[in-house]
Amino acid sequence: MGNEERLMGNEERFETVSTHRPGEKVLRKKRQPKRRLRIAPNIPEVFKFLKVIVTETPFVPMVALLTVLWLLFSTVFYYVEHGASGTEITDYSHALWWGVVAMTTMGTTHIPVSGAGQIVGGIWAVLGAIIFYGAIIASVTTYFARRREGRVKQIISTVTYNMERLEHLSSPELELLKETTVRLIDTELQKHKERDLQ
């Protein structure tokens, strides 16, 4: 088979370029169209991203824990500081605001004046920052680590996750889990048989 015949079979990958001499045929690899930035977000991809964040990362449980602890520490801080002389915490909304800025390490003018307020404030500042930033870092790390997994590993981790919560699955979900598991095992058995034959 000549070069020209081989090139003719691959014409969908090549484009014709004008030549300088008559009778010559010059081909070059087709250029991929330039990707452009989107002005508006790709809505289905945003929903996929949110679904992964909610279902496959520790973000939701960490936010729930953080919210409960924030309300608890803000309430304790309010009751400890409310009656102290020279305090800037005059109502519960100030205590809630203090709880947010202490957790995010943003800094606040509401400085605890009582000894108990300083202890509560110190514990919350450290604990809140650890949970707040830990939730963000853990979720982002899990998200990108999950994306780097191969398709088969993602399916296997999904099957493993669902095996741990069998009693919560509906009948159609159990059927799908069974079919997926059988298909995975059959595929692996086939690979083993092919390796054994070699």
Image (cartoon, rainbow, N blue to C red):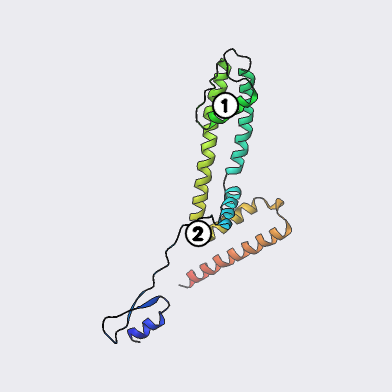
Which is more N-terminal, label 2 or label 1? 1
Quarter of the image where the N terminus is located: bottom left
Residue 197 % position (x, y) = 48, 73
Query: Can you say whether 65 is above or below 31 in the image?
Result: above
Residue at the far right: name it: 171
| Mark 2 burial class by Cα count in 10 Å: few <14, some 14-19, many 20+ | few
Residue 173 % position (x, y) = 69, 58
Q: CA distance from mark 1 to mark 2?
A: 44 Å
Residue at the far left: name it: 21
Quarter of the image where the C terminus is located: bottom left
Q: Quadrant of residue 79?
A: top right
Kind of residue at disc 1: Trp
Q: Quadrant of residue 15?
A: bottom left
Query: Can you say whether 69 is above or below 58 in the image?
Result: above
Residue 160 % position (x, y) = 60, 54
For label 1, the SS is helix
| Label at residue 150 | 2
Identify residue for label 1: 98
Residues marked 1 and 2 touching at CB (< 8 Å): no
